[in-house]
């Protein structure tokens, strides 16, 4: 510009900008490097200034809020001081009012107490006068009642004396009558005693006779039971021995047959035929004995159950002291007193237990004798519990006793 002015004969002395503004961004060409650099620099400057503006605004806002908070705190402190001062003043006034009310109440109570004391003194004086008056009246009434009571007592005493005189006379007469009744009662007592003595002697004789009859019947029953047990035990022993011999024979024949089969197969048919023929002949020969054996075996199968049922009431009884001897009868105790036949179940169980314990040694001896139990230590318990050699199959070494042919069931029943 100075050069242009010089060409015209002018000289530029000073210059001043009267207006200065940024070019609008829409005039910048994005494809021009200079425009792009200018555009980027302008954007950076604008954002920095915007951030700086925001920082200044936020700082100013925070400063304003902090100042407002401080002002609010000061205002609250002032209000608190005012409220404390007001409460203190109200409390002081309340204390003053309470003191004044207490003083007024105290004076009122003192006045009321004085009035009550005066009223009480007045009432006491009135009551004292009334009591004195009532006392005088009661004294007069008591004197009057005493006079009436004394008169009534004198009258009652006179009546009682007359009644006692009458009762004495009646008692004397009753005593005479009682003496006469006592004498008659004594005579009646003597008569009754004599009659009862005759009845007692008769009852004693009848009881003694019944006792002797029961003893004899019991002895007969015990002897009959002993014979039946002996015969039955012998029959069972013989049946068991026959069973053992038959089993042994069959086993021996089977062993011989197997040995012959091992030696020569061609002789199997002949050996089997011979064995069957021998068995048939043995069955035909021992047919009657086998029938009796089967009967005995059947009896032996049911014998433990029958005996167990017979002694079932005694299964929970142990340690009973024996006070009854064998042959003494079931109806007589150790003291010789007769037991009534209509006794209860407990008495019947006790009698059964005593009879069982008393007869056990004899029964055990008979069982050992016929070989149904061990010959040295076997008992009826072994036979009942299945421990007997004849039942467990260990009687191979037991002594062989030839017992007579068991009788028919009808004969045993007799």
Image (cartoon, rainbow, N blue to C red):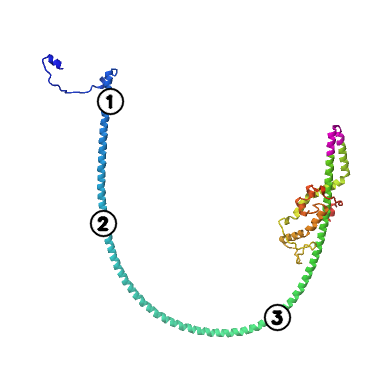
- Of the numbered discs 1 and 3, the one sitting upstream in the chain is 1
Q: Residue furthest top?
A: 7
Which residue was labeled with disc 1? Answer: 44
Residue 295 in view, yes or no: no
Q: Which residues are magenta?
A: 255-272
Q: Nearer the viewer, mark 1 or mark 3?
A: 1
Q: Give the percent coordinates (x, y) of residue 166.
A: 59, 85
Residue under the image location 75 percent in, 74 percent down: 197
Residue 273 vertical position relative to residue 342 in the rendered view, above or below: above
Q: Secondary structure at mark 1?
A: helix
Query: Would you say the magenta stretch is mainly helix, strand or loop?
Result: helix
Q: Nearer the viewer, residue 219 or 146?
A: 219
Q: Nearer the viewer, residue 240 or 126?
A: 240
Residue 284 vertical position relative to residue 152 in the rendered view, above or below: above
- Of the numbered discs 2 and 1, the one sitting upstream in the chain is 1
Q: Which mark is residue 184?
A: 3
Mark pair 2, 1: CA separation: 71 Å
Residue under the image location 61 percent in, 85 percent down: 169
Residue under the image location 27 percent in, 32 percent down: 55
Mark pair 3, 2: CA separation: 115 Å
87 left or right, relative to 175 = left
Q: Nearer the viewer, mark 2 or mark 1?
A: 1
Mark pair 1, 3: CA separation: 160 Å
Residue 5 vertical position relative to residue 241 in the rendered view, above or below: above
Q: Give the percent coordinates (x, y) of residue 245.
A: 84, 45
Q: Is residue 77 magenta?
A: no
């Amino acid at each position: 510009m100075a050069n242009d002015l010089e060409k015209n004969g002018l000289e530029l002395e000073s210059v001043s900008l009267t207006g200065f503004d940024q070019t609008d961004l829409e005039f910048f060409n994005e494809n021009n490097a200079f425009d792009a650099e200018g555009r980027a620099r302008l954007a950076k400057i604008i954002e920095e200034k915007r951030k700086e503006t925001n920082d200044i605004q936020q700082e100013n806002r925070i400063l304003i809020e902090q100042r407002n908070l401080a002002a609010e705190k000061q205002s609250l402190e002032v209000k608190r001081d005012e409220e404390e001062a007001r409460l203190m003043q109200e409390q002081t006034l309340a204390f003053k009012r309470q003191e004044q009310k207490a003083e007024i109440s105290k004076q009122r109570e003192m006045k009321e107490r004085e009035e009550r004391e005066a009223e009480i003194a007045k009432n006491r004086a009135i009551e004292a006068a009334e009591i004195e008056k009532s006392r005088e009246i009661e004294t007069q009434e008591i004197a009057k009642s005493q006079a009436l009571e004394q008169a009534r007592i004198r009258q009652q005493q006179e009546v009682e004396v007359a009644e006692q005189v009458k009762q004495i006379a009646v008692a004397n007469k009753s005593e005479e009558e009682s003496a006469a009744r006592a004498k008659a009662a004594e005579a009646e007592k003597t008569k009754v005693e004599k009659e009862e003595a005759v009845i007692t002697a008769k009852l004693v004789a009848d009881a003694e006779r019944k006792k002797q009859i029961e003893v004899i019947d019991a002895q007969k029953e015990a002897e009959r039971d002993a014979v039946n047990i002996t015969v039955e035990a012998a029959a069972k022993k013989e049946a068991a021995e026959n069973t053992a011999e038959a089993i042994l024979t069959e086993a021996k024949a089977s062993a011989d047959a197997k040995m012959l089969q091992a030696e020569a197969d061609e002789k199997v048919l002949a050996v089997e035929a011979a064995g069957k023929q021998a068995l048939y002949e043995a069955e035909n020969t021992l047919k009657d004995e086998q029938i009796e054996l089967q009967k005995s075996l059947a009896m032996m199968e049911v014998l433990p159950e029958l005996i167990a049922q017979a002694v079932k009431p005694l299964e929970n009884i142990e340690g009973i002291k024996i006070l009854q001897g064998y042959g003494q009868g079931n109806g007589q105790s150790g003291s010789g007193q007769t037991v009534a036949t209509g006794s209860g179940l407990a008495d019947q169980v006790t009698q059964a237990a005593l009879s069982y314990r008393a007869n056990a040694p004899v029964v055990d001896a008979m069982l050992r004798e016929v070989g149904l139990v061990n010959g040295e230590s076997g008992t009826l318990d072994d036979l009942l519990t299945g421990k007997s050699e004849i039942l467990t199959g260990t009687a191979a070494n037991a002594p062989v006793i030839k017992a007579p042919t068991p009788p028919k069931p009808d004969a045993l029943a007799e």
